[in-house]
Image (tube, rainbow, N blue to C red):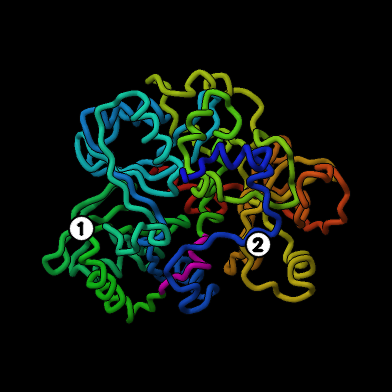
Amino acid sequence: MPTPSLQDGINQAGSPINLLWQPDAEPWTPEVVEREYAGWRQEQAAWHDGVALLNLSHHMYDMWIEGPDATRVLADHGVNNFEKFAIGQAKQYVPVTRHGHIVTDGILAREGENKYLLSGIPAAQHWVQYHAAKGGYDVGFATDASSAFRPGGGTPRLFRYQIQGPLAAELVEKTFGVPLPETKFFHSAPVTLDGRTFHALRHGMAGQAGFEFIGPWEHAAYVHEAFLKAGEPLGLIQVGALAYTTPSVESGWIPSPVPAIYSDPDLLEYRKYLPLFGIEGKRPLNGSYFSADIEDYYVSPFELGYGKLIHFGHDFVGRDALLKAKNGPLRNKVTLVLNPDDVRTVIGGGEDPGFVLSYARHRVENGSVLVGVTMQSASIDPVGTVLAQTLIDAEHAVPGTEVTVVWGEHPGLGTGPEADLGFPRIRATVQPSPFNEHARTLYRREH
């Protein structure tokens, strides 16, 4: 029996929304790592006030792209500037459809003249691999799935450990015995620890100082233990799966936007190529915002804050559409600071709700008028409330603007999108995105 495709799933469900809409869907958290080590509150505090260790080894897909046409296939299907892309540098890779909507993003590292590593959720990898085969590019691929989906189990090819927080540089120097080489943001340098060679990528997740160490899995346990030992006198805290999901809410990165691939007739063959039981068929939609039209969930890279990454100096899929959209009416990315009293009342039933994590699309209203939609919401203990990364109409994006978030789960088809379902409202205040000041200033300038 053939493996069902994404298009098979859409056909059987009757529409993309029927396939994806799942009220009360459990939010994703990383696989394999413990949910909490010291407690999510202490773990969040560690990257604000001390130093934190995050294990990124298990939940991302890696795809190596190598061959004479490696740069060409990536440039033809991504908005990025490949004329300025040094070996050892990483970029946020942004592929878009012909209509200028994002497929999803990923982290692309250049490992050689004709070799790249694309990491993240596999939607961008699927897009590149499909178009490489369809376009006859001279390029090969090697893929390592996440630990939850690796065929036959086994171990990852790479370890990834991130060190971040105000004491990150001190911990790294204690571990290696010397300061790391001066490295630009999102560039990597080779490092050696007791004869074991791997790479250090200058990186941070919540606007704090940080490094990401990447190397062969055979060195994983040794490197991990070395960080723990060196970090003990500094109060190093390991970050579990719950807290791991939250730095993006502070740093302004919106994870897993809906891939804009479900409705274009020209992408029918692509939907037949994709497996139903993959990220495109199984990442659920839910929340108080509902539309029967999947295109209402598509987003522009401009809305996600990726405008500076778009290099119009080369031809790529979606270029003409992005040129038209550049000066058009687009939503702004903001951070909503939810009223802590309302959070306790609505989410906690009058008590502290504890850890809150939601990828639901919740309605954001001014009065009773829809003005935006949340993309990810999470408790940020150092802030004392829930923050929500949100796309909102430009006229309501001014910091200090008061809005309300409709907190609930629309049942889906059969009930009108604007139906009054009696959902409670949470007052919220618009603030910039990224919310973290360092991420908004120094971090962004370095990038």
In terms of secondary structure, where does tag 2 sit? strand
The kind of residue on which mark 2 rests is: Val
Across and down, in percent, residue 47 comes to 45, 66
Across and down, in percent, residue 356 comes to 64, 66
Q: Which residue is drawn at 15% across and 64% down?
A: 196
User: In the rendered image, is residue 152 in sight?
Assistant: yes
Q: Does the magenta stretch include residue 210?
A: no
User: In the rendered image, is residue 253 in sight?
Assistant: no
Mark in front: 1 vs 2: 1
- What is the magenta range? 238-246
Residues at marks 1 and 2 touching, judged by CB atoms closer than 8 Å: no
Q: Is 438 located above or below residue 292 in the figure?
A: below
Question: Viewed as shown, does residue 79 lie left or right of 184?
Answer: right
Quadrant containing the C terminus is: top left
Question: Viewed as shown, does residue 303 lie left or right of 372?
Answer: left
Across and down, in percent, residue 316 comes to 41, 23
**Distance between the alpha carbons at the discs numbered 1 and 2:** 37 Å
In terms of secondary structure, where does tag 1 sit? strand
Residue corresponding to mark 2:
386
Give the camera-side residue of 146 and 166.
146
Q: Does the magenta stretch include residue 239?
A: yes
Residue furthest out toward the front? 1
Give the camera-side residue of 318 and 52.
318
Give the camera-side residue of 283 and 35.
283
Residue corresponding to mark 1:
198
Q: Which residue is drawn at 33% across and 80% down?
A: 232
The kind of residue on which mark 1 rests is: Phe
Across and down, in percent, residue 243 comes to 51, 67
Residue 11 figure quarter: top right
Q: Which residue is drawn at 49% across and 40% down?
A: 104
Which numbered disc, 1 or 2, marks the residue that appears first in the sequence?
Answer: 1
